[in-house]
Image: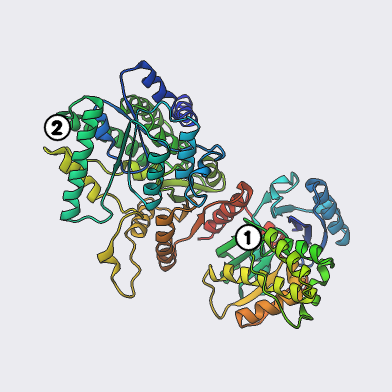
Amino acid sequence: MITAGIDIGSTTTKAVVLKADDQFVYALQPTGIEISSVSRQVLAEACENAGLQPEDLDRIVATGYGRISIPFATTTITEITCNAYGVHYLFPNASLVVDIGGQDSKVIKFDKNGRVVQFAMNDKCAAGTGKFLEVAAQTLGVPVSEMGDISQQSQNKVSISSTCTVFAQTEIVSLIARQTNKEDIAAGLHESIVSRVFGLISSVNPDPQAEVVLTGGVAKNVAIVNLLERMLGRKISVPEDPQIVTALGAALLARQWES
Amino acid sequence: MEEILATFRDYCEKPYERAAQIKAAGKTKIIGCLPMYFPEEIIHAAGALPVTLFGSDDPITLGDGHLMTNACDQVRSSFDSLLKGKYDFLDGIAAIYICDQVRFYLEVWQLDHPVDFFHQMWRPYKWDSSTQEFFHRELKRLIARLEEFTGNKITTEKLKASIRLYNKSRNLMRQLNELRKEHPGIIRASDMACVVASSMLLPKEEHNELLAKLLAQLTQQELSAGKKQRIIAVGHPCSMPEREILDMIEDNGMLIVDDDFFTGGRYFSKDIALNDDPLDAIIDFNANAIPCTTGHYADAWIQPDKIYSPYAEYVIDLMKHGQAKGVVVLKEMYCDPYDMEFVLMKNRFEEEGIPYISISSGSLEAIRTRVQAFGETLQFV
């Protein structure tokens, strides 16, 4: 059976095509506002990378916040269930995943079969998400992809007291006015995100020995990984492609999902 | 059946239309009661119509000028409705101090917007012989004020007749709930909430008649739960849950088989006994009410190393009796008593390995993700 998982995130749409021999290929694109057509394009691209046609797909599972807008999907499954399943497939010993995406962050506790036991989401505001970093990077005038590296050069980290993206921006502007180094501001911002995520982790009472995996676009930020490791006091695993884990989980679940 | 359900929905859409009609007819005084626990039977026995004040879903524009924005929505939106003239049909207001917010709110109400009949009552947070005696005096005080205001004497016989009528209403709603447990999905949870909420808005005589018709038609229905998971829903101790969220739950692989909402099981689970002394019966009903997050259980709390929450045990029992696989907790934002009890409840759920989800606010899409994810989780339990 050939399946696909398509994860329509707030920032990026990801498609994974999973072949019968467990080999998988993927494609991704910014989501934009044309969810349905972008999804078709991403899926077509993933199929092309796999040497297949979209017609060759037996089942397609749509996930992510735009999942209900995909008419060609066989079914929809939430990003919570898909993410945990994808992480379990890549890290069979893990039991906790922290996913920091563009619009929300979530912590999912799952069992030895990859099934969700408990989850917590920050979906009410952009604090503690990729959007927070994006807005802050814009204010600091640096590319978001460089934020992690810049923060690691900090000699004198400042504290960003606000956990709200809008108020944090005001705070950054004040810090800039006081000629604070952008490296120190960036370090404070990273700590603010990680503190927020740490609170979310605590709310699901994780097993202190659990192997923790970090996924989502923000997992590419080394400074976030380091800070979270320090706060949790243990090593964190990061997949090679942290953005596509949810789409991979969707493709895996497509194999077994009953109508 | 659909026609009757639509009538119940209509009453919830236009909650005070019927009461305003009755008021316009000119004979019956209408008393608005703030949720919850107000002994409506006493108002009925005085020949007046008690109507529950639910506030409204409209944006709060005027109310926030008088109340703090971290007061619960029920309190702020009721005050907003008052200021917008939505309660102009009322002859009076009556409420029990169920929490600090309501008490504070009533004081602001009395100062900023006085009405002819304004009755505030204490109801003990902890029950023993001294507080029962105190509540007895509070009930007598209510009776005296209502008699003076309506000009009608509340006799023992009248009060017993009102209790009988309200028991009949509770009994009909219990029958509907039992049907829902036996045949999940026979009535949608959002419609169930409308049935109960409308009973707080209409004369019970009219509501009982309509509900009896619905029951007669529902029992002829045959239904299968299919692959959907049985769950119970709790929360909203003194407000109505959003019907859209209830529908969302039932459209995502779950069926609500029982609940503990103000507009649900909490309102109809128990009857007031038809004793010789109806006041004693009302006291007994309150003292032995189903556990509530606004109650105090100080003696039971003092148990080292043991989580004790009578409310949590009640919810767990509901779940067992309803053969439910999980619990959805719909929390009213800024409801202090519920938030505090939720900590204990959550710990008990975790001790018992009960799947649960708590939803308080957020965009509907964000709530849909949580609800759907919870439904998916239950399929594996």
- Tell me the residue that label 2 is attached to: B156
Q: Position of residue B169 (x, y in %)?
A: 30, 33
Could you give the CA–CA distance between mark 1 and mark 2, rounded to whole angstroms? 59 Å
Vertical order, B187 against B19 (above or below): below
Which three-letter amino acid code belongs to the residue tagged 1?
Ile
Front residue of this view, candidates B119 and B15 = B119
Residue ID at (19%, 49%): B134
Q: Position of residue B120 (x, y in %)?
A: 30, 42
Which three-letter amino acid code belongs to the residue tagged 2?
Thr
Judging from the image, mark 1 belongs to the subunit labelled A
Q: Are marks 1 and 2 on the same chain?
A: no
Q: How many marks?
A: 2
Q: Position of residue B164 (x, y in %)?
A: 22, 32
- Tell me the residue that label 1 is attached to: A80
Give the position of the N terminus of chain A as an image quadrant. Answer: bottom right
Quarter location, residue A246: bottom right
Q: Secondary structure at mark 1?
A: helix
Q: Position of residue A69 (x, y in %)?
A: 72, 45
Judging from the image, mark 2 belongs to the subunit labelled B
Q: Secondary structure at mark 2?
A: helix
Furthest residue to the top? B25
